[in-house]
Image (cartoon, rainbow, N blue to C red):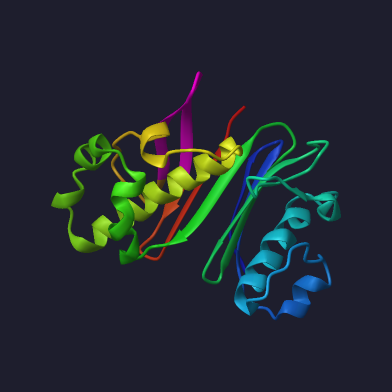
Amino acid sequence: MPIYYQQNINDFTQLAVWKIEEAESFFTQKVTIQQQVTHPHKRLQHLAGRFLLPYLYPNFPSDLIQIADTRKPYLTNEAYHFSISHCGDYAAAIVSSTQRVGVDVELVTHRVNKIRHKFLHPSELSNWDIEALEEQEKFRTLTLLWSAKEAMFKWWGRGDIDFSECMRVEKSTLLPSGILNARFQKDNFTASLELHYQLSNELSLVWLNND
């Protein structure tokens, strides 16, 4: 079974990352595709993400998932809060019966360097001393920060967010796993958040569970 990573975060919240090695038929035995996804690999990613939901919670009602105008999947009765992410051959999901959640998984890549000014505030670029980092460490750091903001965006779930203005990630010494402290502010809503992460030279995984 290609579980790449799994964690029981608490009694009510579980997380898993699946490394996709199966054919589409493996997943369609368990879940149905609810959106029109024509690209074969994107369809496989979509199915793997949906597959993880009942894998984490066997009673998860996958067939009742709705899609909001913001493209966030949700359950109308909020029996479970959940978030899904995928990249390359990986799919990630986090499910909680009590708290809002967000997850993001990203392949570490140089491409994120080209868009850093779109999602990082000038103060973050300065605090993290991005220009002084060696190339591979720069890509790892930027990918992690992008992943952190994507996870917060999914946790927020209401769209209409300026990534550089509404979300700020505090400087931290990066380890293979750890916690990032962040601040989220949108209109009159403000929250201090703890984001947990796993980081390698190939993959960045960030998640949060917070009311």
* Position of the N terminus by quadrant: bottom right
Question: x%, y% of residue 44?
Answer: 66, 73
Question: x%, y% of residue 183?
Answer: 42, 28
Question: x%, y% of residue 185?
Answer: 45, 26
Q: Is residue 190 magenta?
A: yes
Q: Residue at x 70, y 36 (%)?
A: 11
Residue closer to the observer: 69 or 198: 69
The answer to which image quadrant residue 24 occupies is bottom right
The answer to which image quadrant residue 139 occupies is bottom left
Residue closer to the observer: 57 or 132: 132
Residue 100 can be seen in this image: yes
Q: Is residue 80 magenta?
A: no
Residue 207 can be seen in this image: no
- Please provide the residue range marked out in magenta: 178-196
Residue 178, compared with residue 16, is above or below; it is above
Q: Residue at x 22, y 37 (%)?
A: 127
